[in-house]
Image (spheres, grey):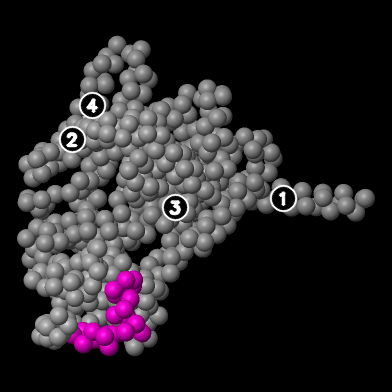
Amino acid sequence: MGEENKSNSILKKTVNIFDKKLDFFINNYLVSLIIIGVIGLSIRLFYFPFDVPLILDALNAYFFYATDISILGHLPTDFTIANNGWPVFLSFFFSIFRFDNAFDYMVLQRGITISLSILTIIPVYFLCMRFFDKPYALVGAAIFVLEPRIIQNSLLGLTESLYILMISITLCLFFSSNRKSTYISFVIIALASIVRSEGLFVFFPLLIIFFLRNRKERNVILKTIFATGIFILVILPMAIFRIQVQGNDLMTSRIVSVTNEVLTSTHETGFNEHVILAIENIVKLSGWSLIPIFIFFMPIGIFLILKNRNHQGIMLILVMIFMLLPIFYAFSIAQDTRYIYPLFPLFCVFSLFTIKKIIGKKETHNTFLILIIVGMLFASVSFLEIKKIDYNGESELFQISRVVVSNVEGVNQIPKIEKYISAAEIANKWPIKSTPGNLRETYEVKQFSLGDIKTLEEFITKYKDQKLTHIAVDQYSQSILSEVYNHEEKFPYLEKIYESKEHGLKYNLKLYKINYSNFTKYNLSTN
């Protein structure tokens, strides 16, 4: 029994010594933030898809638009896109760096979103400092940078990294005791609204809170008008540009159109059904997005804020409620958890209320905080490993898509590679010397859907005059295409020009050129 007490005493002293050693890092927040940032960056680089191009919105909207700006030297005047703040920001870097191929620009785009994601720990840290001491604020920053969905999203080259950074800066400045910082926050949220129009739903609660905080002052109305004026003046130039090019500002007009759309859809399908679907999705997807880190801390944190009537915390909850409004609409039509990511800086603050409650006044609280960070690191990496994408396989698909676009004018849709067709076209035809203002009009391989067509001959006949030149099949092809894959000898008018497995690739795609002379003879002989 005495030996056991002696061992416990030694362990306790060791823990106390270790806890005091941690004071250096706690008190030197810059060193701690650098360490946290390096860990976050290392994880992102480990999962970085170096050989996989951008796809979907990251390519078809933001990359194209940013490239147009860097080539033209100004914003395109014949078209624009919603939320063009991100590609405008991106085009600045595209103009500085000059590469010989499009893929390097795609890597740069991803590198910028990663960098912005890491930099967000700074405003998140200072936002947490508005509510907690340094040790807890560092944990809040660590929660954000280690959150696996934020890590995954930062690798996609999308707009969220810049938007979340700006939202974090806005909240950090707004909850500052410095009056000038509060006004600057309205500048930042205006810029954030250009990046994503959902920023308007952050502006409104901030304006309400601003009025309530200053309601006892004699000139509160003037101050509120001044804050509103700052927001409008910053957002106005881009709004005017969009109106001139597109016919509307793509911000307030989107809110009006969405409102009309909701009213129309609820009239057709029933208001209750529409609301129920939105609620089901927001509960399901929000709950899913809390796994694996926030699920343990965030809900309890909100409960503690309301229970203890923490006024600052309640203000953050008000901001969250407003931010949920566009998410509520988005979840009623699409199931994508990335709509909820801009709320994560708030979730970091809410989680700290729970963590502080758990640790209480323990003497070795530094050690417990480090253990929590280590636990989050383990949970994050485990989640990323479970959800890890086979980037080697995706790289193969991109290689094959480059072969396809190098040989075809028109081809049937191939689900496995169609997402890489646009990227392959740009990669193959780079460098671009000039552009009409829209790369999508210049680079486009035609892809045709089989639909309900019953025979390959019928499909070829239908799209012959629309430049259908090739047929592509793989091991996943169904219906009439599976017959081509397994019994190509039955189709004498198809000339195989490529098979990916012959080049050492695991995924096998066969590409056939349509010999229309033989096709005509075949049709005559069979009819």
| Image point (23%, 72%), residue name | 455
Residue 253's disc is: 2
Q: CA distance from mark 4 to mark 1?
A: 52 Å
Q: Earlier in the sequence, mark 4 or mark 2?
A: 4
Q: Which residues are magenta?
A: 477-501
In the image, residue 224 sits, relative to residue 202, either above or below, namely above
Residue 329 in the magenta stretch? The answer is no
Q: Nearer the viewer, mark 4 or mark 1?
A: 4
- Tell me residue 195's x, y (percent): 25, 45
Question: Which type of secondary structure does the marked residue at label 1 adopt?
Answer: helix
Q: Amino acid at mark 1?
A: Val
| Image point (12%, 83%), residue name | 524
Q: Nearer the viewer, mark 4 or mark 3?
A: 3
Question: Which type of secondary structure does the marked residue at label 3 adopt?
Answer: helix
Q: Amino acid at mark 3?
A: Arg
Residue, disc 1: 15
In the image, residue 462 sits, relative to residue 505, either above or below, namely above
